[in-house]
Image (tube, rainbow, N blue to C red):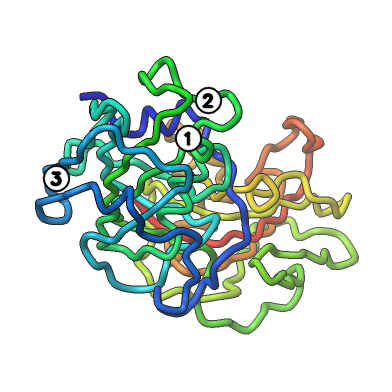
Amino acid sequence: MRRASALIASAGLLVAALTGCSTTGSAAECDAPVSAGAATDLVTVDGDFGKTPTVDFPTPVKTSTTQASEIVDGTGAGLVHGQQVTLDLSIYNGTTGAPIEKSAYDGTTRTKYVLADSPLKGLTDGLLCAQVGSRMVIVVAPDDAFGPQGGSEQFGVGKDDSLIFVADVVKADLPRANGASQPVTNGLPAVVLADDGTPGITIPSGAPPTELKIGVLKKGAGVEVQEGDTVTVHYTGVLWDQKTVFDSSWANGAPVPLVAATGSKTQAGVISGFAKALIGQTVGSQVVAVIPPDEGYGDQAQGSIPAGSTLVFVVDILGVG
């Protein structure tokens, strides 16, 4: 069976909305946008969380509204918009009963998914307010699946077909840094956070430092980032001289995975100053890094970054692996 992530990738699910449930508190305090109903009541699921489920339902299963039911209870805070989760998925065509895709349930084919409004809105709505350790049954209405184009010929889904997802929430990265605030080092840019966690960065007057400067704004209690780890982050990058934002995952709509290693040494690595800002930090931390040209892009222009630029990054470290 093909990897369950293929269906999600085909829908282009890389755009996340940054509003929704509170990022703190229990699932009981989270206002889920969908609930159980007649369609989810038709789906029977047997088996333990993390193991291949036995799924049974009569055909056709039709619904005009997306529905979700929790089969196995999880723990912790409810999932929120913009959060990246790791899932084991089994996906079925509700009209024909045919399996579309299925995880191997051995840790090798798990799906990384950012809870997003578009285009597969129904899966996101069914997962919002679920918890890590939950097994969810989600019946996605056609309008909440592939959008205006209706269905997917590639996956044998007609424009009037509902989709049935059995989703195990294996892991959830943080939606934003949640560590304890730390004293700010003199000379570093000032950082003020919007309600959704987006940083606003004020560059000091005067010449930039000529050496790499790293400050911890929040100290997280999670695992420590090791060199070579894949790290999920939110970040904003600013040019020191121009005092303008040149890139931001917040503005782009989703956190991103980066390899905590220098690109000259490791494929898919990052500039050396950014790698040094990540290595040794803990999940839940927020760091600010002032990166001189010799730790950044040097005397080469890079897109909207002029040659010889000093870069400032504010980075939320949301997860490892």
Amino acid type assigned to the residue bearing label 2 in the image = Gly
Cα–Cα span, label 1 and label 3: 24 Å
Q: Position of residue 170 (x, y in %)?
A: 27, 55
Relative to 163, does residue 235 appear above or below in the rendering? below
Q: Give the mark toward the camera: 1 or 3.
A: 1
Query: Can you identify the residue that label 1 sits on?
Result: 142
Q: Residue at x 45, y 74 (%)?
A: 220
Residue 92: image tag: none
Q: Is residue 39 visible?
A: yes
Query: Can you identify the residue that label 3 sits on?
Result: 53
Callout 1–callout 2 Cβ contact below 8 Å:
yes
Q: Residue at x 76, y 49 (%)?
A: 310
Q: Secondary structure at mark 1?
A: helix
Q: Position of residue 111 (x, y in %)?
A: 34, 41
Query: Can you identify the residue that label 2 sits on?
Result: 150
Q: Is residue 291 visible?
A: no
